[in-house]
Image (tube, rainbow, N blue to C red):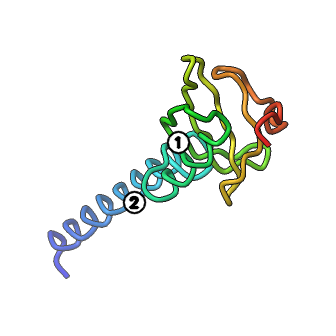
Amino acid sequence: MTLRKRAKVAIAGGVLALGLVGAGTAMAVSGGDGGGSVSGPDADHARAAAVAVAPGGQAGQVRAESGGGAAYGVDVTQSDGTRLDVRLDRNFAVLGSQPAGQDAGGDGGDGDGG
């Protein structure tokens, strides 16, 4: 292999490695272990379960969670305009809810949601 060809292969390998590192970083920041936005059927199931805590409420953003046994966190706006954070397990069972903006402290919330 010529020196020029080796240089091209090395550069291509470096670009590939950087791409993989970037993709891995993006996945870590946006997803799996907490805080990342959830979409698709899982988000739909989570919203449906969360509004059971606040009948007449409207479910909004669904987040991936990792603390206190929760898999999902759902923002719910109640009919009176107040907001709740509802925490669900991976089977979409309600673990608890609390007013939006309060930290659950890892104990699963105040437990008023089930």
Amino acid type at circle 1 is Val
Q: Nearer the viewer, mark 2 or mark 1?
A: 1
Mark with earlier residue (2, 1): 2
Q: Nearer the viewer, residue 65 or 79?
A: 79
Q: Give above or below for 53 relative to 11.
A: above
Left or right: where does residue 15 sit relative to residue 105? left
Q: Which of 9 and 43 is in front in this view?
A: 43
Label 1 residue SS:
strand
Label 2 residue SS:
helix
Location of residue 11 by image quarter: bottom left
Q: Are marks 2 and 1 in contact (CB under 8 Å)?
A: no
Callout count? 2
Left or right: where does residue 80 sit relative to residue 12? right
The residue shown at (82%, 31%) is 110
Q: Is the N terminus in the top left, top right, bottom left or bottom right quadrant?
A: bottom left
Q: Which of 85 and 19 is in front in this view?
A: 85
Q: Residue 90: x and y, percent?
A: 67, 58
Few, some or many residues within 10 Å of mark 1 (<14, 14–19, 20+): many
Farthest residue in the bottom direction? Answer: 1
Left or right: where does residue 62 sit relative to residue 21? right
Label for residue 20?
Answer: 2
Q: Residue 34: x and y, percent?
A: 61, 44
Farthest residue in the top direction? Answer: 81
Q: Give above or below for 90 relative to 79.
A: below
The residue shown at (64%, 42%) is 52
Q: Residue 25: x and y, percent?
A: 47, 49
Q: Which of 99 and 72 is in front in this view?
A: 99
The Cα atoms of the two marked residues, 2 and 1, are separated by 27 Å
Amino acid type at circle 2 is Leu
Label for residue 62?
Answer: 1
Q: Is the C terminus in the top left, top right, bottom left or bottom right quadrant?
A: top right
Label for residue 12?
Answer: none
